[in-house]
């Protein structure tokens, strides 16, 4: 569907390539309006994440993943955002408020032969906290001085499942109704997902 290389420096006019230093999921339920999936079929979106540096292990700004079972629905907030592609597209994405209940994991010093595969959306999951794996880059205090910048690639993959559900349209509407139209400051959000021009819809 789509891929992105991150080196810690902005690449291209959109600013892509920087590390994402916030707890987030890549998509919200509004993504369902922009994928060509048979209307009765369930699907999942997955991230495949690995190093592209053949010379060393990941040390700077590794990726941390949050155990979905430790996320409460009330920990999830939605944000108006720009995707760092060019031309930029507007999206509504998911962020995570910190809670002491949350349990985070990371895999230190990953090699190019090691790959993380984690879920970003799953229409089979009714609970919003179980649909996505929240993740973030973070500063590891154990990182040695002068360690090379992280160079990684992430590919986003669509999996369409065999099972059919006659209530898929109802389910999608319910999921999307979870995305509030009013911000925390009381103002109204008019943003919705625009087509992601770098995503393969064919």
Image (cartoon, rainbow, N blue to C red):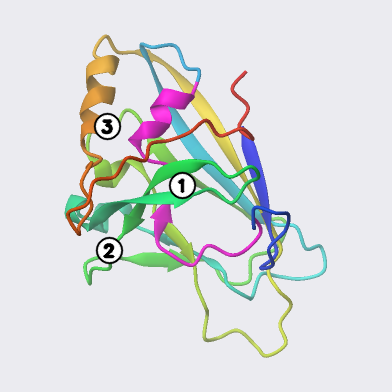
Name the N-terminal-most of marks 3 and 2. Answer: 2
- Total of numbered circles in the picture? 3
Residue identified by numbered label 1: 26
Q: Quadrant of the C terminus?
A: top right
Relative to 185, does residue 30 appear above or below in the rendering?
A: above
Q: Which residues are magenta?
A: 16-35
Which type of secondary structure does the marked residue at label 2 adopt?
loop
Residue that extends furthest to the bottom in the rendered view of this protein? 145
The answer to whether 73 appears left or right of 147 in the picture is left
> For the stretch drawn in magenta, what is the main secondary structure?
loop
The answer to whether 93 appears left or right of 48 in the picture is left
Relative to 9, does residue 27 appear above or below in the rendering?
A: above
Near-viewer residue (44 or 97): 97
Question: For the residues marked 3 and 1, what is the alpha-carbon distance in whole angstroms?
Answer: 15 Å
Residue 119 locus on image (x, y percent):
44, 43
Magenta stretch encompasses residue 165: no
Q: Quadrant of residue 196?
A: top right
Residue 93 locus on image (x, y percent):
39, 47
Residue 70 locus on image (x, y percent):
25, 58
Near-viewer residue (97 or 66): 97
Q: Which mark is residue 97?
A: 2
Q: Which mark is residue 107?
A: none
**Callout 3: few (<14), some (14-19), or many (20+) C-alpha neighbours within 10 Å?**
some
Q: Quadrant of the N terminus?
A: top right
């Amino acid at each position: 569907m789509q891929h992105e290389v991150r080196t810690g420096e902005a690449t291209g006019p959109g600013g892509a390539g920087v590390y994402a230093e916030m707890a987030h999921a890549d998509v919200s339920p509004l993504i369902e309006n922009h994928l060509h999936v048979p209307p009765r079929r369930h699907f999942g979106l997955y991230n495949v994440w690995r190093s592209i540096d053949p010379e060393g292990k990941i040390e700077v700004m590794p990726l941390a993943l949050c155990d979905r079972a430790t996320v409460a629905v009330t920990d999830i907030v939605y944000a108006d955002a720009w995707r760092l592609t060019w031309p930029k597209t507007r999206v509504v994405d998911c962020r995570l408020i910190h809670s002491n209940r949350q349990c985070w994991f990371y895999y230190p010093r990953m090699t190019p032969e090691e790959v993380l595969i984690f879920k970003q959306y799953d229409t089979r999951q009714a609970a919003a906290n179980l649909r996505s794996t929240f993740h973030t880059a973070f500063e590891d205090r154990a990182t040695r001085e002068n360690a090379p910048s992280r160079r990684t690639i992430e590919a986003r993959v669509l999996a369409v499942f065999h099972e059919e559900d006659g209530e898929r349209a109802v389910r999608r509407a319910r999921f999307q109704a979870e995305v509030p139209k009013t911000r925390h400051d009381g103002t109204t959000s008019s943003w919705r997902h625009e087509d992601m021009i770098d995503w393969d819809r064919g």
